[in-house]
């Protein structure tokens, strides 16, 4: 290839001089050389543009697929391709989608900090209560309190969305940590069978993220006929904001 490039870049005088010494190059020969050199330049990997990645989400694997889903969800939370691709992921990878969305939104460090701080607060409360962590606000009338786990069937059968949401510094008895308290207008007589989830990928990934990192979402019930979930403000921001999460985060009494 270098030899052919040098032939092309030779000046007319040098070509004429070569012709005089070697008997000359015919026009047909020169045309062949130019054509061959041009073809090699066009097809050379050095000059070829990188191929466009036109693969669909389902054709991707591992981290590539997770990042693709995250980008689609940040661009449009209800993206159909993202939802279709999300449904093919295993449980742990769905939690990674939430982490990837946090990274896309520039909230990755805030989310990690929230996880670390909530984990430390949980350990402190557990020590104070003799091994049983307390998540609910400190007032009388609490009938139960425990972690609410994710259930895949909610994506199929749905559930009840929160009737109201308030911001609360006392949701987990940590006055330095802002949380959102979701109130559901029904009582649970069997909180072990009370499950959380969502029919949309972004909120579903949020619920799974909290299960992977904490074992579930902080929940409790009162004696007035309501159930509650407590979720950190960063988690809600990553999940699309309060207006998006509120009607799509649901609870269902599975048994």
Image (spheres, rainbow, N blue to C red):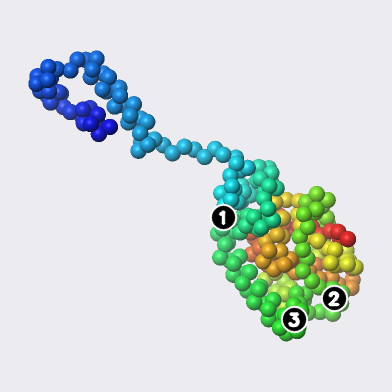
**Neighbourhood count class around disc 2 (C-alpha, 10 Å): few under 14, some 14–19, many 20 upward:** some
Q: Nearer the viewer, mark 1 or mark 3?
A: 3
Q: How many marks?
A: 3
Examine the image and state in which quarter residue 224 appears: bottom right
- Of discs 2 and 3, which sits in the foreground? 3
Answer few, some or many: residues within 10 Å of disc 3's Cα (few below 14, many 20 plus, some between 14 and 19): few
Instruction: Please tell me which residue is depicted at 17% across the width and 17% down the height of the picture.
Output: 25
**Residue at horizontal 80 percent and vertical 67 percent from the top:** 228
* Residue 153 pos. (x, y %): 80, 53
Residue farthest to the front, as pictured: 22
Q: Secondary structure at mark 3?
A: loop
Say whether marks 1 and 3 touch (CB < 8 Å): no
Residue at 44 percent of width and 39 percent of height: 50
Give SS at disc 2: strand
Percent coordinates x, y for residue 138 in the rendering? 78, 79
Q: Earlier in the sequence, mark 1 or mark 3?
A: 1
Which of marks 3 and 2 precedes in the sequence? 3
N-terminal-most mark, 2 or 1: 1
Distance CA(mark 1)–CA(mark 3):
37 Å
Q: Position of residue 187 (x, y in %)?
A: 89, 66
Residue where numbered disc 2 is placed: 142
For label 1, the residue is 104
In whole angstroms, how far apart are the C-alphas of marks 2 and 3? 19 Å
Q: Quadrant of residue 114?
A: bottom right
């Amino acid at each position: 290839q270098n030899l052919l490039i040098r032939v092309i870049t030779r000046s007319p005088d040098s070509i004429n001089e070569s012709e005089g010494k070697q008997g000359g190059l015919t026009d047909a020969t020169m045309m062949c050389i130019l054509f061959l050199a041009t073809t090699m330049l066009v097809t050379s990997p050095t000059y070829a543009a990188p191929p466009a990645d036109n693969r669909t989400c389902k054709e991707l694997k591992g981290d590539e697929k997770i990042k693709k889903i995250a980008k689609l969800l940040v661009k449009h939370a209800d993206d159909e391709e993202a939802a279709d691709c999300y449904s093919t992921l295993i449980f742990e990878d769905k939690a990674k989608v939430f982490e990837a969305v946090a990274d896309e939104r520039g909230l990755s460090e805030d989310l990690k900090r929230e996880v670390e701080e909530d984990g430390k607060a949980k350990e402190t409360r557990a020590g104070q209560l003799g091994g049983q962590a307390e998540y609910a606000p400190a007032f009388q009338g609490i009938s139960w309190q425990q972690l609410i786990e994710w259930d895949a069937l909610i994506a199929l059968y749905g559930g009840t969305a929160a009737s109201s949401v308030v911001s609360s510094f006392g949701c987990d008895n940590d006055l330095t940590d802002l949380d959102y308290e979701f109130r559901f207008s029904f009582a649970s007589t069997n909180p072990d069978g009370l499950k959380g989830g969502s029919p949309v990928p972004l909120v579903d990934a949020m619920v799974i993220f909290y299960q992977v990192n904490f074992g579930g979402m902080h929940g409790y019930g009162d004696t007035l006929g309501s159930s509650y979930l407590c979720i950190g403000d960063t988690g809600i921001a990553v999940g699309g904001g309060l207006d998006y999460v509120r009607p799509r985060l649901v609870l269902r009494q599975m048994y």
